[in-house]
């Protein structure tokens, strides 16, 4: 036995030397081109924190509804967005979108009673429902 050489049985050696069938190559190309990117897309969302998922959920809601404002209490009570259950969750997501330039913060002022917590949408996503 010589050093550095791997001895394989003749049947296995013949299989290794054989070219890879076209169908196997196509299956590998399919996995690389479609399956791996889709798995990254699907399972990549699981890697996001709950806060980041909340921001993404709120951003999708703004685009889908073509909202002109985000009223925290309305979102909490009527829209029931996943991951945005409490007013604090919605405010955190809104503040992140304020930082990204999607929303403007509600005006601060002294008013009798509870102040309205509505963030104005500052970006346009096509025709709005009036």
Image (cartoon, helix red, strand yellow):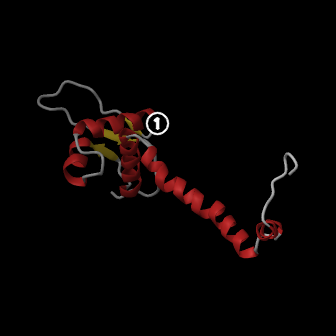
Residue in the foreground of this view, choosing between 1 and 41: 1
Outermost residue, right side: 2
Residue 98 x, y percent position in the rendering: 40, 35
Q: Is residue 15 above or below residue 127?
A: below
Q: Is residue 12 above or below residue 104?
A: below
Please give the count of numbered marks on the rendered protein. 1
Q: Is residue 10 above or below residue 88?
A: below
Residue that mark 1 sits on = 100
Residue at (70, 71) in percent of width and height: 24
In this picture, residue 72 sits left or right of residue 67: left
Tag 1's secondary structure?
Answer: loop
Q: Quadrant of residue 49?
A: top left
Residue in the foreground of this view, choosing between 47 and 115: 47
Residue in the foreground of this view, choosing between 68 and 89: 89
Residue 78 x, y percent position in the rendering: 21, 53
- Around disc 1, counting alpha carbons within 10 Å, would you say few (fewer than 14), some (14 to 19), or many (20 or more)? few
Q: Is residue 119 above or below residue 124?
A: above
Residue in the foreground of this view, choosing between 92 and 2: 2
Residue at (21, 43) in percent of width and height: 73
Residue 17 x, y percent position in the rendering: 83, 67
Residue at (66, 70) in percent of width and height: 27
In this picture, residue 85 sits left or right of residue 1: left
Residue 100 x, y percent position in the rendering: 46, 36
């Amino acid at each position: 036995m010589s050093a550095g050489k791997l001895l394989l049985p003749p049947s296995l050696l013949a299989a290794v030397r054989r070219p890879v069938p076209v169908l196997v190559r196509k299956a590998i190309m399919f996995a690389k081109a479609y399956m791996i990117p889709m798995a990254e897309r699907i399972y990549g969302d699981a890697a996001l924190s709950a806060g980041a998922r909340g921001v993404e959920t709120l951003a999708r809601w703004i685009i889908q509804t073509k909202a002109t404002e985000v009223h925290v209490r309305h979102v909490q009570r009527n829209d029931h967005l996943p991951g945005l259950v409490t007013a604090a969750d919605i405010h955190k997501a809104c503040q992140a979108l304020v930082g990204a330039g999607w929303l403007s913060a509600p005006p601060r002022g002294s008013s009798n009673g509870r102040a309205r917590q509505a963030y104005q949408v500052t970006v346009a996503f096509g025709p709005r429902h009036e």
